Image: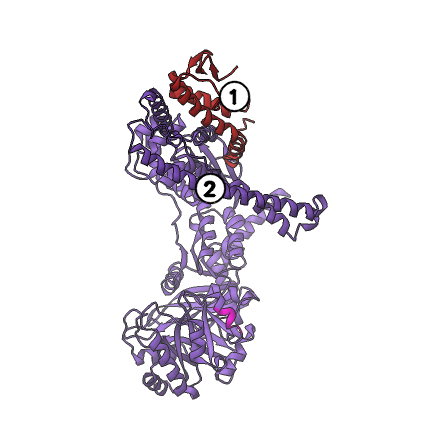
Chain colours: A purple, B red
Amino acid sequence: MKKIDLHIHTLSTISDADFCFDIDILDSYVRTRKIDVIAITNHNLFNLEQYKTISSRLAYITVLPGIEINIGENCGHILVISSSANIQDFSQRCLEVQQKITQQHDYLSLDDFKQIFADLHRYLIIPHYEKKPSVDKRILRDLHDVIYCGEVSSVKKFIYCQKDNDDLTPVLFSDFRACRGNVSFPFQQTFLDIDEISINSIKLCLKDKSKVSLTESEGHSMFFALPDLKLSTGLNVIIGGRSSGKTYTLDQIYETYENIKYIKQFSLLERDPNKAEEEFTSKLNIQQSSIAKDYLSEFSDVVEDVKDISLTDNERKIEKYISSLLKHASECERSDAFSQCSLYAESEFQINDLNKLKDLIQAMEELLDSTQYKSIIEKHISRDILISLYEDLIRTHIYENELVLKKRWINELVSLIQSNLQSNTAATRIEDIDFYEIQINRAKIKKYEKIVNNLRMPRNIYRKELQGFILVAKTNTFNGAQELKNKCGKQVAFSDAFKSYNNPYEYLQKLKDINIEETTYYKYFMDVEFKILNQYGYPVSGGERAEFNLLQEINDALQYDLLLVDEPESSFDNLFLKERVNALLKSISQELPIVVVTHSSTVGASIKPDFMIYTKREITKLGIKYKRYSGVPSNRYLMSNDGETMLNIEATLDSLEAGEKAYKDRSEKYETLRSFEG
Amino acid sequence: MKHLEVSKGKGYFLDSKGDMVEIDKITKEDILRLLDIVTDTEQIFEMDPYDDKTELKNEAHKIIYSHIYKKISELIENKTRFHDESASMYKDALAKYKYNSD
């Protein structure tokens, strides 16, 4: 087994925060973490002189020359690692990279990359895979025959890629900056089952996922969470007496990694029930806002379509038309050669909308192109008829489109002639009007009003079982301007608009006068309220609310790389923990590592963890010493890092049952109670 | 009953009370009402045709009648399109938010 870390930075570049490389720190890191192979992979450059210095200082391990390159338009990162035998050639090629990438967002195209490195089989190429910024999928496909693994950013992603046959072999590296003063050494290294170290042996090993792991002996089911703490990639339970270092261990893990979900002790307990209920409802509304948005999406489209329609403008247009027509007619005796021209009183051609016809043609194309349902379609309509109909529609479209173009051209011409005639006559010109548009606008407003009135009828729009609770969404009308203001969340006045709340058309016109986003008008017609009910269909109590929150928080952990839970029993009862929490934790531990600190036998024992850690405070002559013993729950002994053992049963009974005597006493009591039943 | 009529050299329209009124007295409210009749599926808009041979001695009536006749004729021509467009208008929203008291 060799421990490798092929992603280390030793030079500060434009892509890094400024740092000052310290070779002592790198030496110390390699020694402390007992690493066998490292690669120097600075951003878009390779410094041969520095590499030689590092290699000579770390001569007790293998130091490979490498480079981390921005590749593709989205600047994904890719490591190119060479054998030290090709160092001169590699250095020359890296110089070309350096010349091409001079700014932070510069990148190599795939062609540039191939052209610079020529024979890619000579290198170990490792793209950022489940790690940002990741390399474009298209590039990965193109380079698939020279890529043997992909870099991931967390244990969770490592496990995920290990399990999925379609994923690349994952490797987890530190991305360490060996800078002055940095004594916090990362644990992200990967073990390879190899004896000899060379680019080829590493490549060969990476072809077999089972030979790649996060610990030396336990394969990929274990990883180092802390230098002296190995954990399962599944469910871990930390037990131990008071002040034995359980929470301290969780805190240490939390500080070591990024993207960790940490549910601290008592964090979900409610201190002020009223405030807690308000916060809960508000949080629920935000979390579930997509449900409300989905429900209102069609209405939102309607509002978007009618918001610019003004019935007042419609009437004004008719008024202008009729008054100009009447005036023009009354002036007939004043008519002259210009106003008597037929074109002077001519109105514009109405332009037909061909969208419906286009839709029909598209639908025909879908029918003709469908291979999946071809037999059903042809069972009812012969292909010849379909083609004939399609051709007819196309011909009609050509004809009507031509007509539209002609009408447009004529309208422009008539308009030009009219304005020329008008400049030579005193007669009033008749304002043009489109009766079709007027009627369509009125029809739209009528339908919009009908939709608003229907929408405002209170109803239940959503119901879903959620981890033993029921999430319901109900619509309600707004009861005052304040509710609208709360909905908006801004300091704007809705009082005037609310006066017209029951007249949908006027209400929309008034919303337009308020300083709110046009795209949000639809939200102010009715409200969607979310409630969590318990399994019996009643509103949840404070305790149930906390239970729901815990389950949600645990579920939310799927977005993270690691979940830490500190003494859930301090806030919740055993039945809930046993029936709901344990199952959820167990299921989520299939996806990411979980560490639970507990005193409770309900959690500690019933949850059937994959790995147990027992923390113990020992008072010695030299002072207080915190020790950790660990092992799989079925082991007879748990073992500390320095090789000491302790009986698993002893640790378990001490931590979860208040010692063997208390456990026996309790068992006897239960037996006595049971005997009454007999 | 006709909604637009030519009689004794003058043009008339049917007002809201059902009386035939001279066309030069037409207002915007009358126009809106007549448009509603044109686009109503239940009603048929009836009017005397107008062409060069139509006897409209009153010049002012001739201009007004001919103009309104032409505009309304266009709308009648597009009545089917109007109904197709109205029928498909906001169909999804109407179906989704239809209130069922059950």
User: Mark 2 is on which residue type?
Assistant: Lys
Asked if residue A180 is among those painted magenta in the image, a careful observer would answer no
Q: Nearer the viewer, residue A29 or A197?
A: A197
State the extent of the magenta-drawn residues as a range: A139-144
- A179 shown above or below A477: below
- Mark 1, Cα crowd under 10 Å, few <14 / some 14-19 / many 20+, is some
Residue carrying label 1: B45
- Disc 2 vs disc 1: which is toward the camera? 2
Q: Nearer the viewer, residue B35 or A676?
A: B35
Overall secondary structure of the magenta section: helix
- A548 shown above or below A133: above
Q: Quadrant of the C terminus of chain B?
A: top right
The quarter of the picture where residue A410 lies is: top left
Residue carrying label 2: A406
Residue A145: % across, % down: 54, 75
User: Mark 1 is on which residue type?
Assistant: Phe
Can residue B34 be seen in this snapshot?
A: yes
